[in-house]
Amino acid sequence: MSRMHVSFHLALLGSLVVFALISGVFWHLGGREIVGHSIYAVILAFLLLALVVGAVAYPLARRLTKRLERLPRAVESLGAGDLSARVPVEGHDEVAGLAASFNRAAERIEALVGAHKTLLANASHELRTPLARIRMATELIKESADPKRKAGLDQDIAELDLLIDEILLASRLDAVADVDASEEVDLLALAAEECARYSDVQLDGESALVHGNPRLLRRLLRNLLENAQRHGQPPTQVRIANTGGRAQIVVSDQGAGIPAAERARLFEPFYRRRGSSNNVGAGLGLALVRQIAEHHRGGVEIAATSTDRNSFVVSLPL
């Protein structure tokens, strides 16, 4: 028999013993005549039994339910990304065993994810050295190499450099829970600086002050603009707005609308749309946009528009 069953049986037996003792006292004090001649005594006895059982069983049941309540909260925290979530192990019954099993599983998951992030960051960092050598070699053979081949090699190096940079940034965002170097940032001013890099981008809206990392927010805007330039059609429109206590960054282009079934997958790392003719880029741009937005306690989505155009909406707390 399990420890939990034993505990419940002991609680029930204890309740019956207490009821028997109280009944004996009641009988000894003159309740014999009442029990023999009145139905109210029977009702009183059952009420007394229910009271005793409830009083004895409540502490045990409450202690059990409190421990059980901690488990779903810990599971939700772990699922939300808090890999340090653990459950206190109390007692020696099945609930304690379940809590210990959860803690062991959470520790293994945290160790595996940590090792994966470390490996990814280290591998990306180590790629910088051979990439620098290749870049130097291309400069040394600049005069003798075919210009077309040299241009293609330079483009390949630039794409590889961008991929390494995005992998390193994604790894750092995964490893750091809070926004570092947080300061007040005017999204309209930041967007104006980024939009000035393109000739076919239109900007409007109002000033929106948020607290965050200006370098990361600049990267978020730049990735959205680069995505519109690569996969959309000009002109690209950027709008900054304050809506319901939150700042919104809306980046729209005139390209073909994205099917609803594909919208969520666009933010997955290395995802490429079916039938896309433009495979430029590493496939991490929009994934980084989502990571940076969530890093600032915000979010990003693709909004459905009446003109069936692409419209990426980033929402950040003011």
Image (cartoon, rainbow, N blue to C red):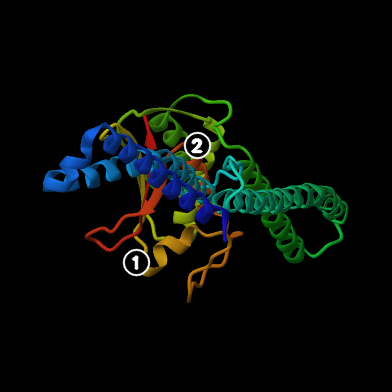
The reply to whether residue 199 is visible in this rendering is no
Residue receiving disc 2: 217
Along the viewing direction, whichever of 98 and 141 lies nearer the viewer: 98
Which residue is located at x 38 percent, y 33 percent?
317
Along the viewing direction, whichever of 146 and 224 lies nearer the viewer: 224
Q: Position of residue 106 (x, y in %)?
A: 63, 50
For the residues marked 1 and 2, what is the alpha-carbon distance in whole angstroms? 26 Å
Which quadrant would residue 138 be assigned to in this image? bottom right
Which residue is located at x 49 percent, y 30 percent?
212
Q: Amino acid at mark 1?
A: Ala
301 on left or right of 5: left
Q: Amino acid at mark 2?
A: Leu
At numbered mark 1, what does the secondary structure look like: helix, strand or loop?
helix
Q: Going by the picture, which residue comes out furthest to the top? A: 184
Q: Callout 2: 10 Å neighbours few (<14), some, many (20+)?
A: many
Placement of the N terminus among the 4 image quadrants? bottom right
Q: Earlier in the sequence, mark 1 or mark 2?
A: 2
252 shown above or below 260? above
Which residue is located at x 47 percent, y 53 percent?
9
47 on left or right of 82: left
Q: Position of residue 202 (x, y in %)?
A: 35, 44
122 shown above or below 305? above
39 on left or right of 263: left
Residue receiving disc 1: 260
Give the mark toward the camera: 1 or 2. Answer: 1
Along the viewing direction, whichever of 71 and 122 lies nearer the viewer: 71
Q: Callout 1: 10 Å neighbours few (<14), some, many (20+)?
A: few
